[in-house]
Amino acid sequence: MRIAFSFPVSFSVSLSGSISVPVSAWAFLVACSPAWSQDYGYAQADVPVSIADKGAKVTPVMLKHPVTGAALGLCDGLAVDAAGNVFFSEPASHSIYQVTPEGKASVFYSGHGDAPNGLDFDPQGRLVAGVQGALLRFSPDGSHDTLAKSPDFKTIADLAIGSDGSLYATNLYAGHTLFRVSADGKTIQANASVANPDGVKWLESKKILYVSDRDAHTTWQFDVGEGGALNNKRPYVPDIPGAGGIAIDEKGDVFLAGFEQGAVHVYSPGIKDPFLGHILVKGSPTPKGNNANQAFGGPDGKTLYITGNGGLLQIRLNVRGLARTVSVFPPLPPANRAGAAPRLRVAGGQVVFQGIMGLDSPRNASGRAFPTQALRAR
């Protein structure tokens, strides 16, 4: 059903027919439809051109289950690997999906009552997923083991993994706790200083952790101290109801999911007026838009992927994601025949192998290229 108000000329309701009644007021439009319908006319960026072209549109990537064709529900966890594959979760169906750079969609993981949510990649290129009661760790072939277990892991909404393999995990709604987990999964520390943590982003180069707080409507900033201790809690981005996932671009601008507004809000903290604008993911920034998370990806790091109520979307930007210090995906190939270990160099923003099978670029004995790990935010 679509209800349209066109003023001062007429009012119309269009189902199978139409009714027109003169009304006097300003013109506006209200669309009543399922979340993220095929009408993306109003889903666009309203930000400076340094961030996105004027009128840049949000477009769908995956809105239906790749096997059954059923419409997707609320999707959340989001991570992009070195080869450009996008992974995202749909907790209600206990699934993790994968979309290749060519747009081919598949079910990467299907669980049984474990509701996977937060996702991130570890230094070895393994996907880590937060499920009820555990953190699962996936190899590129889809096999997995358990990194850590805890009955306190209820709704692991987001993960931030460091270069040493340790991580922070947010426990949304049930438990209201921020966890730090050691690289071997044996040490789990709880931090209850955030009322209802959702998004988390770890900026290791500056020893800073960002955590969004649903209840306080604030994204907090912590200093990361010895052993991962969190100190000096302070507001980073205030006044966002339902603050969700966090992404940061190469300039330090913060992209924050406004779960209750149906928009990605963009801030440049540290300036007098930090709010730069927003990216609408539904017809208008009204409640129930329910976008949950976002992450940078694409061949040049300038595609912002967005998850929320209805699937996976994307928008092209003019900025890249913030660089990360991470290892290569997949794990390094074995040493070459001469016994020399592979060497790494950075070229064009990517890590490149040297000394493997006598080739400068990463290839195995059959000549197949290994994907290189982009040093950009996921």
Image (cartoon, rainbow, N blue to C red):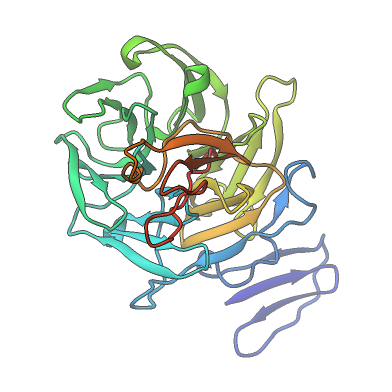
Residue 64 x, y percent position in the rendering: 43, 72
Residue lying at 16% horizontally and 27% vertically, measured from the top left: 186
Residue situated furthest bottom in the rendering? 16
Residue lying at 35% horizontally and 18% vertically, measured from the top left: 193
For the question of whether residue 260 can be seen, the reply is: no
For the image shown, how many numbered marks are present on the structure?
0
> Which image quadrant for residue 264?
top right
Residue lying at 70% horizontally and 66% vertically, measured from the top left: 41
Q: Is residue 187 above or below residue 361?
A: above
Comparing 177 with 120, the one in front is 120
Residue 173 x, y percent position in the rendering: 31, 38
For the question of whether residue 28 can be seen, the reply is: yes
Residue 319 x, y percent position in the rendering: 69, 42
In this rendering, position of residue 50 left or right of residue 205: right
Q: Is residue 59 above or below residue 200?
A: below
In this rendering, position of residue 134 left or right of residue 365: left
Comparing 273 with 373, the one in front is 373
Residue situated furthest front in the rendering? 338
Comparing 53 with 353, the one in front is 353
Residue 345 x, y percent position in the rendering: 53, 35
Comparing 305 with 108, the one in front is 108
Q: In this view, does 290 lie above or below 243?
A: below
Picture quarter with the N terminus = bottom right
In this rendering, position of residue 210 left or right of residue 46: left
In this rendering, position of residue 361 left or right of residue 317: left
Residue lying at 54% horizontally and 50% vertically, measured from the top left: 287
> Which image quadrant for residue 36?
bottom right
